[in-house]
Amino acid sequence: MKNSTVVFALTSSIDLANEIASQLGVPLGLCEVKHFADGEIMVELGESVRGKHVYIVQSTCNPVSSNLMEVLIAIDAAKRASAEHITVIMPYFGYARQDRKAKPRQPITSKLVADLLETAGANRIITMELHATQIQGFFDIPADDITAIPIIGKYFKSLQMEDVVVVSPDHGGTTRARKLAEILHAPLAIIDKRRPKPNVAEAMNLLGDVDGKIAIMVDDIVDTAGTLMSGIKMLYDHGAKEVYASCVHGVLSGPAIERLKASNVKGFVCTNTIAQDKKQIEFPEMKVLSVGEVLGKTIKAIEEKNPVSKVLKDFEE
C-alpha cells in the first residue's frame, strides 16, 4: 500500500486526512492549493501519482462552492498526471439537502454535484451520513455512504446513563435514530415538525414518552441550530430530565454556537467530518468525535479488496 496509495488533503480536511494517512501507515501526499486574488483556484500535486491509487480528502463545508471547486480541480490534476484510480473522500457532502424537487422549478443540486465529480474523473466516492440515502443512486460509480452512528453510540455508552430515550428531530431521521436506539438499548421518540422555509423549523408534536428520562437527540446535520433549539424546548416541556444533542456534521453556521451556549442542553456531540477547531474555542463544552479510524479502515478494505460492510460491523460491535 505504501508504494501504490497516495492520500492528499485539501484545505477543509487537513487534520482528518493526517489521521487517515496515519491509520494507513502512509505519509500524507504533497499538495499545494493556491487561491488567486480573483478567486481562481489551482491545485498542484507535489509528487508522482502515475499508476497509483489516489485518495482526495475534502469536506465541502463552508465555503461550500470554493471547497467543491478544489476537489474538482484536484481530480483533474490527478487524472492528467495518469493516476490509475481516483477516490474522493468527502465526509461532509455539500449540497446534499437539495436532493429532490420540493417545489416546481427547484434544482436537485446533489445530483448536479454527483455529475460534476464523475465528469471531473472520480472513480469512487466515499461519504459519511448522507442527508438522504438515495443520493448514492445519483452516482454511476461506486459510492460508499459510511455511517458515524456507531461512533456516537460508543461515546454515549461510555457515559453509562440510565433511563435513556433516543429522539429523532423529524420523521426523515427515524432510521438514523433507531440505529442509535438499538446500540443504546433504548426506546425511540420522534418529533413531528414542519419546515416553512430553509433553516427554519417548527416542532409540532412529540411521538413517544420522554417524561423523567434522559433524552438524546440525534441528527445528521446541525446548521443554524434552530431545529435543535425548538426540539430541546419541546423535550423539556414534555418532562425530559436532561437533554443531550448530537449530530454527525456540525455545520454550525451563523448563530448556532451562541444558541447552543445559551440553551439548557446538557451536552452537544458531533464528529470531525467538518473541522471544529475554531468552534471548540468558542464552545469548549462541545465534544468532537473522530471519524479518522473508520475512514482509514474503509480505505484499507477497498485496497485489500475486502468488504466495506465488515468495517462498519466491527465498529458496531
Image: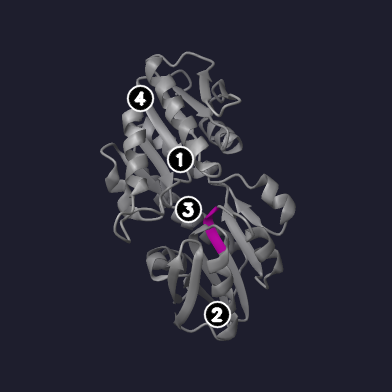
Q: What residue would you read off at disc 1?
A: 90
Q: Amino acid at mark 3?
A: Ala
SS for callout 3: loop
Q: CA distance from mark 2 to mark 4?
A: 49 Å
* Disc 4 crowd, CA 10 A, few/some/many (<14, 14-19, 20+): some
For marks 1 and 4 on the same chain, the one whose residue lies earlier in the sequence = 4
SS for callout 4: strand
Q: What residue would you read off at disc 3?
A: 148
* Disc 3 crowd, CA 10 A, few/some/many (<14, 14-19, 20+): many
Q: Which residue is nearer to you in this view: 236 or 300? A: 236
Is 13 drawn above or below residue 205 in the view shown? Answer: above
Q: What residue would you read off at disc 2?
A: 234
For marks 2 and 4 on the same chain, the one whose residue lies earlier in the sequence = 4
Q: Amino acid at mark 1?
A: Met
Residue 203 at x, y percent in the picture: 49, 76
SS for callout 2: helix
Give yes or no for contact between labels 3 and 2 (Cβ–Cβ under 8 Å): no
229 sits left or right of 180 in the view: right
Give yes or no for contact between labels 1 and 4 (Cβ–Cβ under 8 Å): no
Q: CA distance from mark 3 to mark 1?
A: 14 Å
Q: CA distance from mark 1 to mark 2?
A: 34 Å
- Residue 85 disc label: 4
Tell me where the magenta segment starts and ends, as one range. Answer: 246-250
Q: Which residue is nearer to you in this view: 15 or 183? A: 15
